[in-house]
Image (cartoon, rainbow, N blue to C red):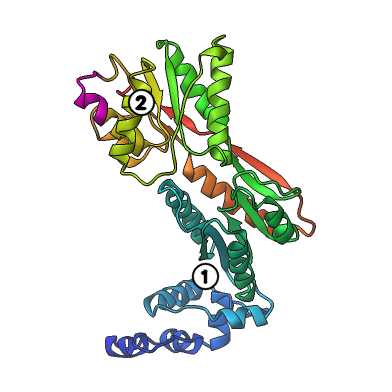
């Protein structure tokens, strides 16, 4: 085996596309041997652990990228996973996406991303594009589009090797379900231990995730024998800054209803509720406890630090990849649901 000088390595690395032959010349072995180690060809070629290590190190040094078309033509997997995501998601969604990418990479896969907003048709076009790229499977993070349930069932009912994040109306599919009902019930119950008038601020209840929070809130009240004490504020869809919107929530909901605790729709909204209450000289949590949702990084660093709910995004991402890998390994895929229950993170604001 030979090792070219630094100049030779630089010349190879500057090529537009590094090939198996380039890696083979770098190590001083055959192209077939390199293909065996890097997964671009099969066969009964034997290779020592030391040689395999040298080949992988050379491939990394030269920034070798496998030829996906060649892999597919040879009957191998493409090593690609498609991810369908909404184009305007809450920021916490990208945390889940980051963990999906992490666990996909650890298992030898790369991601293709397809974005759409409020359109099942657009999502399906991305799905068909993924199929043209011969992706091995798809993780769908965007499908809760009110009024498009029939379209979802029509277009995705026969989709193969697909895992949904969040429960869907489709039968016999694999999904990771986020149990926000249990999480909000736990948070509300915690506040009810020391507070008399606990309210909740919700976005548009046409979305399933919002209805889950609503249900969890009402379950906690019912369990405490206070089901007639529900205090709910629904946000309008008008465009306004978070500070302006939460200012109105304080003036038109929290103060008139004499709340001593409030659950905001997310941590950003909660921080602006805190800001507006403090402007009016209202002490937190002594007079009003405030809780958010999402466990955004800033929620721990502001003062008072925010009580919130953590969706356990790492678990969601890991389970989504694991479910997809399971689908790859079985001949007759069966539906399966993994439930992730978010946890309450209690801090100074409550």
Q: Residue 192 location in percent, x, y?
A: 45, 14
Q: Residue 229 location in percent, x, y?
A: 51, 13
Separation (CA) of disc 2 from disc 1: 70 Å
Quadrant where the C terminus is found in the figure: top left
- Residue 280 lies within the magenta run: yes
Q: Secondary structure at mark 1?
A: helix
Mark 2 = which residue? 252
Q: Which residues are magenta?
A: 275-283
**Observer able to see residue 329:** no
Q: Secondary structure at mark 2?
A: helix
Quadrant where the N terminus is found in the figure: bottom left
Instruction: Residue at 57% x, 33% y: name it.
Output: 212
Instruction: Residue at 31% x, 23% y: name it.
Output: 349
Q: Residues within 10 Å of mark 2 (few under 14, many from 20)?
A: few
**Observer able to see residue 123:** yes
**Residue 97 placement, left or right of 270:** right
Quarter of the image for residue 137 reads bottom right
**Residue 295 placement, left or right of 105:** left
Quarter of the image for residue 156 reads bottom right
Front position in the image: 250 or 175: 250
Foreground tag (2 vs 1): 2
Q: Residue 270 location in percent, x, y?
A: 34, 32
- N-term-proximal mark, 2 vs 1: 1
Image position of 180 with respect to 64: above or below = above
Residue placed furthest toward the right: 332
Instruction: Residue at 28% x, 38% y: name it.
Output: 243
Front position in the image: 309 or 72: 309
**Residue 36 placement, left or right of 13:** right
Mark 1 = which residue? 49
- Residue 41 lies within the magenta run: no
């Amino acid at each position: 085996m030979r090792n070219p000088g630094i100049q030779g390595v630089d010349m190879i690395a500057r090529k537009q596309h590094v090939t198996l032959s380039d890696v083979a010349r770098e190590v001083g072995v055959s192209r077939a041997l390199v293909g065996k180690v890097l997964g671009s060809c099969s066969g009964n070629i034997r290779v020592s652990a030391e040689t395999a290590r040298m080949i992988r190190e050379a491939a990394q040094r030269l920034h070798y990228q496998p030829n996906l078309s060649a892999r597919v033509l040879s009957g191998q997997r493409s090593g690609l996973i498609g991810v369908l995501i909404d184009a305007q998601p809450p920021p916490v969604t990208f945390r889940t996406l980051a963990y999906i990418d992490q666990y996909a990479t650890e298992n030898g896969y790369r991601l293709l991303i397809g974005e759409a907003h409020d359109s099942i048709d657009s999502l399906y076009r991305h799905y068909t594009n993924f199929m043209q790229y011969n992706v091995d499977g798809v993780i769908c993070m965007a499908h809760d589009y009110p009024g498009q349930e029939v379209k979802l069932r029509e277009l995705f009912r026969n989709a193969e090797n697909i895992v949904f994040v969040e429960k869907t109306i489709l039968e016999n599919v694999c999904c990771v379900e986020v149990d926000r009902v249990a999480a909000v019930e736990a948070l509300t119950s915690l506040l009810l231990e020391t507070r008399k008038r606990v309210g909740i601020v919700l976005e548009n209840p046409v979305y399933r995730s919002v209805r889950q929070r609503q249900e969890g809130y009402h379950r906690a009240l019912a369990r405490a024998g206070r089901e007639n004490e529900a205090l709910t504020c629904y946000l309008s869809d008008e465009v306004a800054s978070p500070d302006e919107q939460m200012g109105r929530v304080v003036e038109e909901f929290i103060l008139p209803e004499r709340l001593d605790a409030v659950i905001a729709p997310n941590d950003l909204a909660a921080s602006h509720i805190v800001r507006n209450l403090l402007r009016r000289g209202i002490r937190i949590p002594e007079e009003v406890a405030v809780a958010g949702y999402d466990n955004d990084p800033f929620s721990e660093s502001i003062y008072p630090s925010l009580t919130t709910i953590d969706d356990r995004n790492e678990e969601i991402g890991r389970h989504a990849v694991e479910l997809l890998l399971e689908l790859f390994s079985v001949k007759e895929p069966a539906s399966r649901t993994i439930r992730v229950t978010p946890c309450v993170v209690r801090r100074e604001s409550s």
